[in-house]
Amino acid sequence: MTAFHVMAGSGAGLAHPDIRRIGVADVFDALRLGWQDFNAKPSHYVFLCLIYPIAGVVLATWSSGVNMLPLVYPLVSGFALLGPVAAIGLYEISRRREIGMDTSWRHAFDVRRSPALASILALAFMLLVLFVVWLVVAQSLYTQLFGDMPAASLSALYNQVVGTEQGWSLILIGNAIGFVFAVIVLSTVVVSFPLLLDRDVGVVAAVETSVRATIANPIPVAVWGLIVAAGLVIGSIPVFVGLAVIMPILGHATWHLYRKMVVAPEGK
């Protein structure tokens, strides 16, 4: 029964929340609302999201050893795959602010009492698996093009990548594969985590709803994906510090994007 609850939620059958069609203007309005949520108590949210720059620095430091150099870029870019998981607390803050409840930073951890916690953890595990698969694919591609011997230094890796035919193949093929991973993650979780936090519908319904929302709003979701990608690049310079501001804003905006795309049940 526990496994069924995780997959299908608390209802007797699979939920099918209604989807609303939105425009690009709605995406930017969600971003504006996300900024308002962040601006309400920025010191609290920066404190909460120090995990982002810290995790980024840790990833870069861990991968700075010679044997891990080829994975520097896949690690940093793939870190975005886990962003929706780390932003769950921000969704909760936006949800509480929306209904006029207390938004003290400690409420970001209220997710641990959510009836959909098991489903949220299952979806988070799915993203972790995708992250690991992305790293394995990236490493395999590098090995196929350059062999088993990694570059001796970061500068050597740079020259290897931009100065050889194999390097340009790595850039083109690697980014194409990364794009596929990004599309899969974006389409499956653009509203999944906020939906699970808002309603205990189960993993299957959450992912299915996210995919339907993407299909119904391909251009707005694509624009949102570009905004997220651009924000992550800007926030990573320098030394990931900007992520402490960029990621909270994107996290709050994700909640408002969910509200715009998924129709709330009657009486809510």
Image (tube, rainbow, N blue to C red):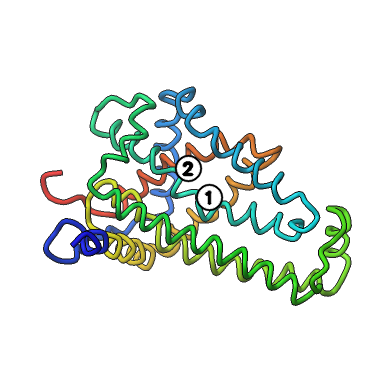
| Badge 2 amino acid | Leu
Q: Which residue occupies 30% across, 31% down?
A: 97
Q: What element carries label 1?
A: helix
Query: Mark 2 sits on what residue?
Result: 250
Residue 39 vertical placement versus 89 (above, below): above
Q: Which residue occupies 43% across, 53% down?
A: 24
| Badge 1 amino acid | Val
- Residue 17 in the image: state x and y as whole percent: 22, 59
Tell me the number on the disc at residue 52.
none
Whether residue 134 sits left or right of residue 239 in the image: it is left
Tell me the number on the disc at residue 228.
1
- Residue 238 in the image: state x and y as whole percent: 71, 37
Q: Are marks 1 and 2 in contact (CB under 8 Å)?
A: yes
Whether residue 120 sits left or right of residue 14 in the image: it is right
- Residue 41 in the image: state x and y as whole percent: 43, 23
Q: Which residue occupies 84% across, 61% down?
A: 151
Whether residue 78 sits left or right of residue 194 in the image: it is right
